[in-house]
Image (cartoon, helix red, strand yellow):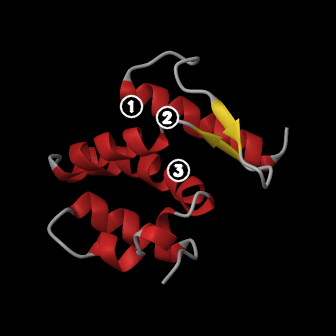
Amino acid sequence: MDANNRTADDLQKINNKTLGTNENAFPVVTLPNGHKVPTGTVGALLVNIKTYDESNDDQRKAIEPALRATIPVLQQVGMFDLFKPQEWIQGGSPGRALVGKLAMEHGGSE
C-alpha cells in the first residue's frame, strides 16, 4: 500500500471516529490524478474545528492530530486555492487559525 492510500485510510478512520460513523459510511474515492480522498473529510473538519474552539488547552492538543491529518487532502482538492490559509487564520476561530497555519507549514497556497 503506497503512502497516499495509507494516508487516505488513516484519515477515513479519523473521519469516522469524529462523525460517529462506521467504516463503510464514507468511501475513499480516487481523483482523476490518482490521489485517494476520503469523503467526509470536510464534515469531520468542521466538527473538529468547532470542538477545538470550545475546548481547553489539553483537549485541543488531543484534537490537533485530526486537524493536521486533513491538510494534505484539503490541499489535493484545492481547498486552500479557494480559501487561502490567511483567510483561515483571520477571524476569531482558534481552530480555523490552526488549520490555516498548518496549511502554510505544509506548503499551502499563499
Amino acid at dot 3:
Ala
Amino acid at dot 2:
Ile
Residue at point 27% right, 58% down?
95
Badge 3 or badge 2: first in the primary sequence: 2
Badge 1 or badge 3: first in the primary sequence: 1
Mark 1 lies on a secondary structure that is: helix
| Crowding near the residue tagged with mark 3, few <14, some 14–19, many ≥20 C-alpha atoms within 10 Å | many
Q: Residue furthest right?
A: 1
Query: Which residue is labeled 2 in the image?
Result: 14
Residue in front for this viewpoint, 57 or 107: 107
Residue at point 57% right, 63% down?
75
Mark 3 lies on a secondary structure that is: helix
Is 43 located above or below residue 105 in the figure?
A: above
Q: CA distance from mark 2 to mark 1?
A: 6 Å
Dots 3, 2 in contact, CB < 8 A:
yes
Dots 2, 1 in contact, CB < 8 A:
yes
Is 78 located above or below residue 69 in the figure?
A: below
**Residue 37: image x %, image y %?**
64, 43
How many numbered dots are placed on residues in this image?
Answer: 3
| Crowding near the residue tagged with mark 2, few <14, some 14–19, many ≥20 C-alpha atoms within 10 Å | many
**Residue 9: image x %, image y %?**
66, 34
**Residue 71: image x %, image y %?**
52, 58
Query: Which residue is labeled 1 in the image?
Result: 18
Residue at point 14% right, 47% down?
54
Amino acid at dot 1:
Thr
Q: CA distance from mark 3 to mark 2?
A: 8 Å
**Residue 33: image x %, image y %?**
78, 55
Q: Residue furthest bottom?
A: 110
Query: Which residue is labeled 3 in the image?
Result: 69
Q: CA distance from mark 1 to mark 3?
A: 12 Å
Q: Which mark is residue 66?
A: none
Residue in front for this viewpoint, 39 or 52: 39
